[in-house]
Image (cartoon, rainbow, N blue to C red):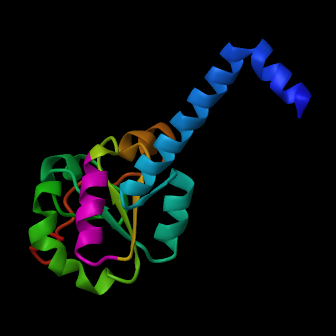
Amino acid sequence: MSRFLEYITNHPFLIAAAAILAVLAIVIEIRERAKGSSMLGTGDAVRLTNSGALVLDVRDAGEYDAGHIIDARNIPAKEIGERAETLKKYKDKPVVVCCENGFASATAAKALKAAGFNKVATLRGGLRTWRQENLPLVKGSGKKDGKQA
């Protein structure tokens, strides 16, 4: 114990830097948990999608038509609160929320959590990361029988 105290007194800048890094790590962890949803990498998102998870694209319809994940449903982020009821059958199933860069999807995921959805996750980095990893996108609208998802 005396050697530890000697180390602290001989290296105050190293100790201060270590303390700052520890506090920073704790703050980042608290902020991530406060978001209300977990973030998934593209590999985990593909795995969840293949096992039946709902992929919810919260971009505008024009961006959605330009390219979206296969079988993704489109509800713009500003309409999530009003249209969450249309997704009620997915309340206990995994929902992967995505947008262009990951920011709008975090807000939408928080709204879904508030609406009672239990398993909500966001795509880390959004569709920008999806494209960087050369994963497939479908172009065109997601309309079936004249109805938007």
- Quadrant where the image shows the C terminus: bottom left
* Residue at the front extreme, as displayed: 2
Residue drawn 44% across and 56% down?
33
In this rendering, is residue 33 above or below 116? Answer: above
Q: Position of residue 140 (x, y in %)?
A: 22, 55
Residue 115 magenta-highlighted: yes
Q: Residue at x 22, y 75 (%)?
A: 115
- 100 lies above or below 144: above
The answer to which image quadrant residue 3 occupies is top right
Task: Name the quadrant containing residue 82.
Answer: bottom left
Q: Quadrant of residue 37?
A: bottom left
Q: Would residue 57 be seen by someone viewing this image from the given angle? A: no
Is residue 113 covered in magenta? yes
The x and y percentages for residue 126 are 37, 46
Q: Which residues are magenta?
A: 104-117
Classify 122 as above or below 25: below
Image quadrant for the N terminus? Answer: top right
